[in-house]
Image (cartoon, rainbow, N blue to C red):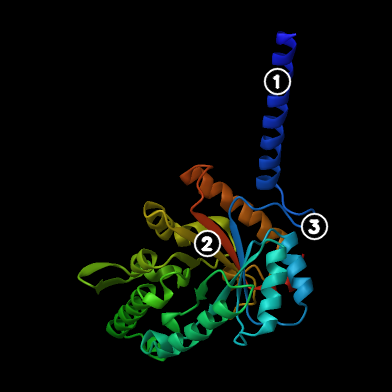
Amino acid sequence: MKKKNIFISIVIIVFVVGLVVGIFYYHNTYRDKNTTPTPLFSLGVWWWGENENIDEYLEFAKQNGINEIYYSNSSFDESINEFISKANSLNIKVYFLCGDYIWIEDESGFYDIAEKYLEYQQTFENTFSGIHLDVEPHQHPDWKENDEIRKREILASYINFVYNITNADKLKDTTLDFDIPFWLDDYIIDFNGEEKEAYKYIIDYADRVFVMSYRDNAERIFDCAQNELEYSNNLNKKLFLCVETSASSETESVTFYEEGKEYMYQELETLKDIISSNYGEQFQNYGFSIHHMKSWYELID
């Protein structure tokens, strides 16, 4: 009788342990039946204030594995609360997208928007996951003059802007992302007693960095961002490699506009393989981002 009781106890213990493990596995592996599995890496998309077709775009994002959106909208009202609620229900995070080259030399405009952002965060139920900044130094009017000294001055001001806002007390609990062009490694800048490539300062100060590695081929995308990828990995920082889907006035090689969705998906899979072969299959310090929602949605199949 004693042996029988021991056997029953063992069976109960095994059953309970198995049940707990099963629940944990299910909780961490699957989402709601109406959503896609969590990607092994972050996959994001810029959403530049296209307020039409919201439900269609969100469904498209979900079906394609998107798990974060960089959303540009200045209303900070109930419509934003509803949008984030819909996105979150699909396990998609939403970051507030903003940017103006003017902030490089006059930070006041950014802080005005940051105040509205923080007020929204404290007021509404469904909140942003952080701020995503698209502040591009090469949009400064003086950049077009091709004065190398002036370009370095602009970049130094840009780095100073990034340093200041990432060290602002009011934003200490806010995730701050930055978009950067891939060619910042061409410029060595003297800042705060250091002298190094411009991109390194941004990776140093930002929470996450998004390299605009706009090319229509996996190998070239990787080549564009390889220095940034290496440096961010050494600092254990998250770095995103980004692709373009809009028509380009420069050259066809910077966008997937001509090739279409399926070709882009194939190249992104190849890019994963290239990164894995260089950094190992378990490497998680990278993600992909697509510019932007409307043009991607309308891209040919």
Q: Position of residue 72 (x, y in %)?
A: 60, 80
Which label is found at residue 9?
A: 1
Nearest to viewer (mark 3 / mark 2): 3
- Classify residue 148 as left or right of residue 272: left
Kindly identify the amino acid type of the residue bearing the numbered disc 3: Asn
Label 3 sits on residue: 34
Helix, strand or loop at mark 1: helix
User: Which residue is situated farthest in the left direction here?
Assistant: 193
Label 3 with label 2: CB-CB less than 8 Å: no
- Classify residue 96 as left or right of residue 58: left
Which residue is found at the position 62% from the left and 87% from the top?
Answer: 75
Which badge, 1 or 2, comes first in the chain's sequence? 1
Which label is found at residue 241?
A: 2
- Total numbered circles: 3
- What distance separates the C-alpha of mark 3 from that of mark 2? 28 Å
Q: Is residue 278 above or below residue 50?
A: above
Q: Which one is in front, 172 or 183?
A: 172
Which residue is found at the position 41% from the left and 67% from the top?
Answer: 206
Residue 227, quarter of picture: bottom left
Which label is found at residue 143?
A: none
How crowded pointer 2 is (Cα within 10 Å; few <14, some 14-19, many 20+) is rated as many
Helix, strand or loop at mark 3: loop
User: Which residue is situated farthest in the front direction here?
Assistant: 1
Q: Position of residue 156 (x, y in %)?
A: 30, 78
Q: Position of residue 228 (x, y in %)?
A: 41, 60
- What distance separates the C-alpha of mark 1 from that of mark 3? 39 Å
